[in-house]
Amino acid sequence: MAKPRQRKIVATMAELADRHDLYQQSVQCPVAEIDFVLQQFQALRRRKPYVLREDFCGTAYAACEWVSRDDKNRAFGIDLDLEVLDWGRRNNVKKLTRKQQGRISLMHADVLEAETSTVDVVLAMNFSYWVLLTRKRVQAYFNRVYEVLANDGLFFLDCYGGYDAPKEIKEKRKLDGFTYIWHQAHFDPLTSEIECHIHFKFADKSRIRKAFSYRWRLWTLPEIREMLEQAGFRDVHIHWEQADDETGEGNGEFKEVTRGAADPGWITYIVAEK
């Protein structure tokens, strides 16, 4: 009697994918980010910055880009998620030269408690500080940033908003080999807390659902500016993302503005001067 054939198990694209790599491909652009930091620091301070601290650093993608730019550059990366930090060490830091690796320090710590030397630049990008859900905690964080910055240091952070920001919606964007899905799953107007997820979909129809999940406070620009000013920052500059002429979508270029627009969805960079 013939034995039944064993079916060959083939892994799906989702099973073979690395969620952190997908995140870096779909969400982050450290080259453009560091370009912006250097451009703004030169414009406002007329010198080069050399020491950067990346708060809520995740895989330390930006910190690695920073130390690769100049032999004098040093970077700190701080995050509470040890698994993500370890991934960054294996996949980002290890790609640096030995000398570059010696100029980056990753810390498993709370940004409200971490101790580092004085820095020229602090980064808090990808809306990461929105995990701080109360004004008291954000104010405490901004106070800490102010303390660690050099006398002419700059604080870089970002913000998003618009009348689509509190909506419970999904937005899809096709990338090379996969689709990135941003899911605003729930918004509570009483607390301004929002629950968001990132999903990934692949050509073989497999998915990574809730590859990343966030419980954020949807902070507004006036609130952020007020807290920065209360922390002691003397000037706060808002840089509004510009739109593509044909699609109307953001094009990754930012221009300083004094007035905004009632867009359904906008992103800004914020530069706070000590």
Image: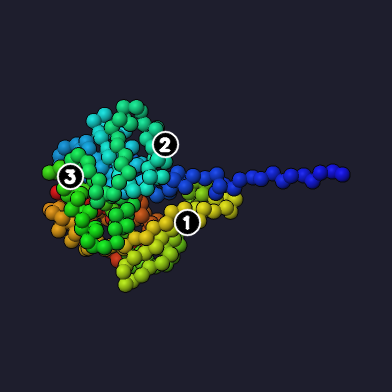
Is residue 171 or residue 149 the one in the foreground? 149
Q: Please state which of residues 154 and 46 is positioned toward the viewer in this rendering.
A: 154
Residue 4 in view (yes/no): yes
Looking at the picture, does residue 48 appear above or below residue 10? above
Q: CA distance from mark 2 to mark 3?
A: 29 Å
User: Alpha-carbon distance for marks 1 and 2?
Assistant: 23 Å
Specify whether residue 29 is in view: no
Report which quarter residue 45 is drawn in.
top left
Q: How is the image coloured?
A: rainbow
What mark, if any, has residue 90 been given in the picture? 2
The x, y position of residue 129, in whole percent, is: 29, 54
Residue type marked 3 = Leu
Q: Spatial distance from mark 1 to mark 3, Cα to Cα?
A: 36 Å
Q: Amino acid at mark 1?
A: Lys
Would you name the residue on which mark 1 appears?
A: 210
Q: Counting other residues with Cα less than 10 Å from the Cα at mark 1, is it few (<14), some (14-19), or many (20 or more)?
A: some
Query: Does the residue at mark 2 contact the one at mark 3 (Cβ under 8 Å)?
Result: no
Instruction: Tell me if residue 101 comes above or below residue 272 in the rendering.
Output: above
Q: Mark 3 highlights which residue?
A: 149
Crowding at mark 2 (Cα within 10 Å: few <14, some 14-19, many 20+): few
- The circle drawn on residue 229 is none
- Name the secondary structure under disc 3: strand
Q: Secondary structure at mark 2?
A: helix
Where does the image place residue 13, in percent across and percent down from the top left?
Answer: 57, 47
Mark 1 vs 2, N-terminal side:
2
